[in-house]
Structures are given as C-alpha cells and as structure tokens.
Image (cartoon, rainbow, N blue to C red):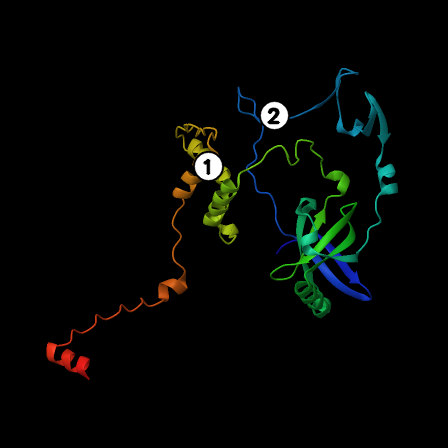
Amino acid sequence: MASTVWKGYITFGLITIPVRLFAAARTDRVSFNQLHGVCGSRIKQQTFCPHCDRIVERSELVKGYEVEKDRYVVVNDEDIKSVAPASSDNMEIVEFVKAEGIDPIYFDASYFMVPEDAGKKAYHLLFETMRKSGYSAIAQIAMHQREYTVVVRPHADGLLLHTMFYPEEVREVPEFRRDESVSVKPQEVALAEKLVEGLAADFEPAKYHDEYQNRLMQMIEAKKEGQAVGAEAPRKRAPVIDLMQALQKSLGELPRKPASKAAQNEPPAASAAPARKQSGKRAARTASG
C-alpha cells in the first residue's frame, strides 16, 4: 500500500473535504557507489577542516550561510524552527483559474489527492465542477517544513495536486528569447506543417521508455556474468544546409499511416455496369418511335 505524504483538509468556501496525498511519480535511476580501484572496497568519506588541519566528527558540524566571501552566519536547529511554517492540516483554495492559463514551467512534484470516506461526495462535487468548468484551483499548504503554492486540477480518475515553483525560482536565461532577425519562408512553414501532421499521434506514455537505463542495466548484468562489453560508435548527424531539401526528404521518409477503421470497413464503390448494346432492329424502332 502506498504511503501517505500528507493528510488533512482541502477547503473552499464553507466546504471542507478530508483528503490524503500520495506521490504520483518518482525518479527511478541506476545509482553507483564509489570504490577504491585497487582493492574494490567501498570508499568512506570524511569531513576535513583545512584551518585546523584535521578530520572532524559530524557532531562538530554546524550550519552556516555565506553572506560574503569566507564569511558565514551560523544557524542552528532552533533558529530554523523559529521561522518554520506551523504544521497545518488545512489546504485552503484561494482562487480558481482557467487550466490553460497556468504555464507548466511552474509545475514541480505531482500528487494524487484521495478523499477519505466522509468526504467522498464533496470531493466528487468539486471534481465534477472543475472538470466541466475547465477551472483549476490555486491553494496554499504547509508540508515538509515548507510553505507551498499548489495547483489542484481534475484528472481522468480524480484530482491531482502539483506543487509549484515560485516566480523567483524560475530561471531567466538571456539566450532563451525569440530572435526577430530570423525569418522563415511560407513554403518552409507549409512543409514543416505537413511533417508535423505526418508525425501527429495521440500521446501514449506506455510507448516511451528510458532506453539508456535499460542499456545500463544490460551492461551491468553482462559484466556481472563476465562478458565483454563494447561501446557502439555514436551516430553522427551532419548539419542541415538546405532546409527545404531536408523537409522534403523528411516527408518522403515518413511511414505510411494505416487507413482509419471507418475507411477499412467501408465497402468498395460499385463500378458502373457497361451499357448493353441494342440490336440493330430494336435500335431502329426506338429511333423511328
């Protein structure tokens, strides 16, 4: 059974709904330990003080915030507790906004929101209302000794909660901007649109896998069995010189999409039957009549 990350109430107006939060996703990566290459033993890291020229115990360590070069403000656990958000079991919705108005760049971690038995009706009322209206909820919550602004939105089976980055946490990169000095031809746009249409499909997450992690585990298993492991030559890509030529070639290499089921089930059009040739006498009677 999945472990509860947070338990409390989500409120809007005078309605209070008891809910639990469960982590919706987690990063699954191969991790390595550091070993001594000579004997294969796992390395132990020690903390060293260059000023005292000795190894120090963890009990001697304190937290410090660098305010200028080599000058620190020492902060202890009591200092941090004095400004930590009060533990709260209440998540208050402060406003509703249109889902398309929220830039996904602000999304951080995702959680499933599950109602307690006593709150199922109110939960589904909120879910259906948000689903039909196209609104998402902006709420505030204290969790893991931190205050979060979160967005709650309807998903296929219920409500999802996303913790959000604050504006000052979203980086500004000067190089990330639209270059007005670059122009593209209408013909290039038209071909690119055809290429996009040729590659268009419904999003199916199950089609995509972390192939690097798979190859990494295969390599580890091979080395475990004493098999030799060789590196594949990297595929080199030549820079695009003629954009139109590259687009046309890409269109020509697109796989043909199968015909739709409706087209496959449609009966073939009946061919027109050839006109019957009239005999000479009948044709003459018809003409004279």
Residue 43's label in the rendered image is 2
Q: Is residue 194 above or below residue 229?
A: below
Cα–Cα span, label 2 and label 1: 56 Å
Instruction: Return the x and y of residue 166 as percentages of the image width and height.
Output: 76, 43
Q: Is residue 272 above or below residue 58?
A: below
The amino acid marked with disc number 2 is Ile
Which quadrant of the figure has residue 28?
top right
Between residues 56 and 94, which one lies in front from this camera angle? Answer: 94
Between residues 236 and 40, which one lies in front from this camera angle? Answer: 236
Tally of numbered tags: 2
Give the class, few, some or many, for how many residues have Cα within 10 Å of label 1's Cα (few <14, many ≥20).
Answer: some
The amino acid marked with disc number 1 is Met
Looking at the image, is mark 2 or mark 1 earlier in the sequence? 2
Which of the two marks, 2 or 1, is nearer to us in this view?
1
Side of 98 where 200 appears, left or right:
left
Residue 22 visible at all: no
Residue 197 visible at all: yes
Instruction: Return the x and y of residue 214 as percentages of the image width and height.
Output: 47, 40
Between residues 166 and 232, which one lies in front from this camera angle? Answer: 166
Side of 145 where 21 appears, left or right:
left
Q: Is residue 133 above or below residue 83?
A: below
Give the class, few, some or many, for how many residues have Cα within 10 Å of label 2's Cα (few <14, many ≥20).
Answer: few
Which quadrant of the figure has residue 183?
top right
Query: Disc 1 marks which residue?
Result: 244
Instruction: Return the x and y of residue 192 as percentages of the image width and height.
Output: 49, 43
Q: Residue furthest bottom?
A: 289
Instruction: Return the x and y of residue 14 as percentages of the image width and height.
Output: 82, 66
**Which residue shows up at 80% across the image and 27% down it?**
60
> Tag 2, which secondary structure?
loop
